[in-house]
Amino acid sequence: LSFNGDLYSTDEGLELTTKGQIHTHNASSNVGLGVSGNNDYVLVEDSTTATGLAWKVNAHASGGSQIKLYDNTLTVNGSGTVFELDSSADPLTATDYSYFNCWLTGTTDGTNPYTTTLNFIIDRSTANTYYQNGQYVNATGVQTWDSSFPATTGELADGTILDSDNCLFACHIVGGFNPVQTKDFNLFSKLFQYSNGYNAWKQIDGWSVLTTANEISYIGIGVGTNDLQAGSRFTIFGNKVT
Amino acid sequence: MTHLVDDQHDELNDILVNLRKKKIFYKIKVREGKVIYLDTKDKDLIKLAKKNNPELK
């Protein structure tokens, strides 16, 4: 046995000389596939070409995407603004984002009677310009409808629902921009407090609360009076349109 | 076939719409048709709420 030191019996197709060119095969020989010359094109399978490959527009790029913007879990009990996404260095704009999906799970902490309120805070605004409308339904189906105009906070639930210590709840909030009212931020929230069976539905118009038109820098969750327990968690996903 | 339509006037809604137009504050809670909480300075709304629920303090 002997070895001549040549691992390659042929160097056909291996000598790529053009920027971006990649090495492939056309079923009979090695070939170089050049780039298309179009930025942001992606390489896809294409059975109609000799190599079975082609550079094309990314078919998934125009559908937008959802990205994680915030995820935090309390390590100690807290009150006040317990969660806050701070995007002031790079504000989230209506050009980039249509709306945001938020998920909040928590446990109340405090002394009965528990009188806390749970609030969605837009751009750290304390303006008395939230218009809200919603309903609470208790475990036996009794409905309480409430409305306030304007309201001092974006109230997701009050002490009617978060009515005692160790209440467990889950809350889904969807909020987004309004291209017509450029400083408004609108919310829908649904909260289920499964310790006492109450649920709350809210529609909130943060009326002219954005500091700058068509962009938001801060998204926060606030609790009044009593605490949320360690382990409570808030996540925000942004739905990008670009 | 008979068609029946409830065309009762919603007086509370009319008042609230008017308050929003005038940008006048109110906070109201209604349970099973009964006003159980009201915070406003609007006389029409106070009058309606007391008529709806005489037990309001």
Image (tube, coloured by chain):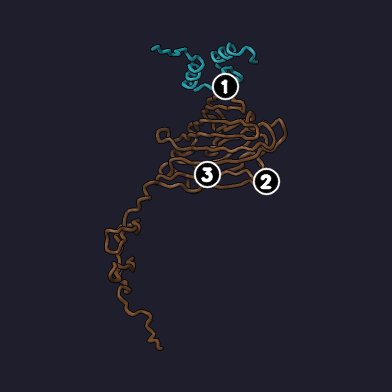
Marks 1,3: beta carbons within 8 A: no
- Chain ID, mark 2: A
Picture disc at residue A76: 2
Question: A61 or A96, which is in the foreground?
Answer: A61
Residue A145 found in image quarter: top right
A123 up-or-down from B11: above or below = below
- Chain letter, brown in picture: A
Circle 3 Cα neighbour tier, 10 Å, few/some/many (<14 / 14–19 / ≥20)? many
Instruction: Give the CA separation, mark 1 to mark 3.
Output: 31 Å
Give the residue drawn at x 61%, y 13%: B53
Find residue A127 and report its horizontal and vertical position in percent.
54, 32
Residues at badges 2 and 3 in contact (C-beta under 8 Å)? no
User: In the rendering, which numbered label is found on residue B28?
Assistant: 1
Q: Which chain is cyan?
A: B
Q: Amino acid at mark 1?
A: Ile
Crowding at dot 1, Cα within 10 Å, few <14 / some 14-19 / many 20+, comes out as: some
Q: Is residue A15 above or below residue B23?
A: below
Disc 2 from disc 3: Cα separation: 20 Å
* Residues at marks 1 and 3 on the same chain: no
Residue A39 lies, in percent from the top left, at 33, 57
For mark 3, give the secondary structure. Answer: strand
In the image, A15 versus A2, the foreground residue is A2
Residue located at (63% from left, 15% from top): B56
Q: Where is mark 3, residue-wise?
A: A236
Mark 1 belongs to chain: B
**Which amino acid does the dot numbered 3 rest on?**
Ile
Give the residue drawn at x 40%, y 13%. B3
Answer few, some or many: residues within 10 Å of disc 2's Cα (few below 14, many 20 plus, some between 14 and 19). few
Left/right of residue A204 with respect to residue A30 in the rendered view = right
- Residue B27 horizontal/vertical position (percent): 57, 23
Callout 1: SS: strand
Query: At label 2, which amino acid type do we have?
Result: Val
